[in-house]
Image (cartoon, rainbow, N blue to C red):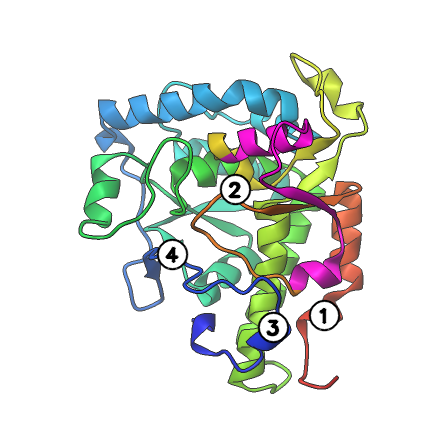
Amino acid sequence: MTEQHQKYDHLFSNIKPNAIGGIKIFGRNDGYRKPQKYDEVTNLENKIWAGLYQNQEWQLDRYACREYLLGIKTLPIPRDRFPSFNDISSLIENSTGWSLFPAAGFLDEELFFDLNASRQFPVTDIVRQSPRFDEKYAGQTIQNDQGYTPEPDIFHDIQGHVPFLMNKDYARFLADMGKLGYALIKDEKDLGSELVSHNLKRLQNFAWWTYEFGLVKNHGETDRFRRKPNDVDIEIYGAGIISSHDETRNVVQCAKGESSRSKFLPFDIEEIVMTRFDYSDIQDRYFVVESMQELYKSFYEHRDLFWYNGNN
């Protein structure tokens, strides 16, 4: 894990100890592939899913970005029961060449980037507040409520991330991030373990502040896809916000000036890659990009930021 190497951590800002917050992480030596047994989904799990979906759908309809809204409208993601990985995966594959990879939970960097590089997105079949979730973390203290959990559960994976995989530009961007991450792990430039770890942290930072907790400016063009017009200056594209009622509410309240808990910062890739984060709480900042195309452009034009060699 990247946390084992800290030689260059002093270069970062917002350093957070124990950033992974007790989350169980699966590697190649673990049973990381876990096919969905759809017939074994319980009524309680379906009820939890329905509660999460219906509690969040009106917020997302009003504040999520265009790419998300178009994706969610074209996929068979039910509002009242667990989604079927097979049903969703086939449609995504036909659209962008991606498929869903059923995983036991949070995967380590090598597994995650390797899968993404081959256009496979890991998704877990476990849902927050369920007996299976409680069993997985028996004896540990980890936040586990309807509004937020640091564990990437099925609601985060399917409801938060998967709709974006129907968009060709986003799908290419995510696959190329996977290829970059895997190249870093394999140390293709012979930088050594400390620099590999440091550069992976840079990539993790970028992923966190963009496709997990990123915001994009609202130019009014998405309102035609909504039931009710967006009444703030931003739209949400980060899956960590989309899958969290509490995080979404925090974003909207801050955007309306009703709360000062979190600040909005202009998108700056150099600042983003050097800013660490914490899984365990509502974010204290969000970076706002001008457009999704600007996000992609910035990544492709600044990939050298992820190959720091220890000089300067």
> Which element type, helix, strand or loop, lies under badge 1?
helix
Q: Circle 1 is placed at which residue position?
A: 305
In this rendering, the label closer to the viewer, 1 or 4: 4
Residue at mark 1 to residue at mark 3: CA–CA distance = 8 Å
- Residue 258 is one of the magenta-drawn residues: yes
Instruction: Using residue 41 as the reference point, say whether residue 108 is left or right of it.
Output: right
Report the magenta residues as a range.
247-273
Within 10 angstroms of label 3, few (less than 14), some, or many (20 or more) residues? Answer: many
Badge 4 is on which residue? 21
Out of 54 and 276, give the one closest to the viewer.
Answer: 276
The tag on residue 199 is 3
Residue at 58% from the left image edge and 39% from the top image edge: 261
Res. 240 mark: 2
Question: For mark 2, does the 10 Å Cα neighbourhood hold few (<14), some (14 to 19), or many (20 or more) residues?
Answer: many
Is residue 162 at all visible to an observer of this figure? no
The number of callouts visible is 4
Amino acid type of the residue that numbered disc 2 sits on in the rendered structure: Gly
Residue 30 relative to residue 234: left or right: left
Of pointers 1 and 4, the one earlier in the residue sequence? 4
Disc number lying in front (3 or 4): 4
| Residue type of the residue flagged with mark 4 | Gly
Q: CA distance from mark 1 to mark 2?
A: 24 Å
| Mark 1–mark 4 CB contact (< 8 Å) | no
On screen, residue 279 above or below 249: below
Disc 2 versus disc 4: nearer the observer = 4
Residue plotted at (39% across, 54% down) = 106
Residue 216 drawn at (x, y percent): 72, 38
Look at 48% across and 25% down and name the residue there. 76
Decide which of tag 3 and tag 4 comes sooner along the chain: 4
Mark 4 surroundings within 10 Å by alpha-carbon count, few (fewer than 14), some (14 through 19), many (20 or more): some
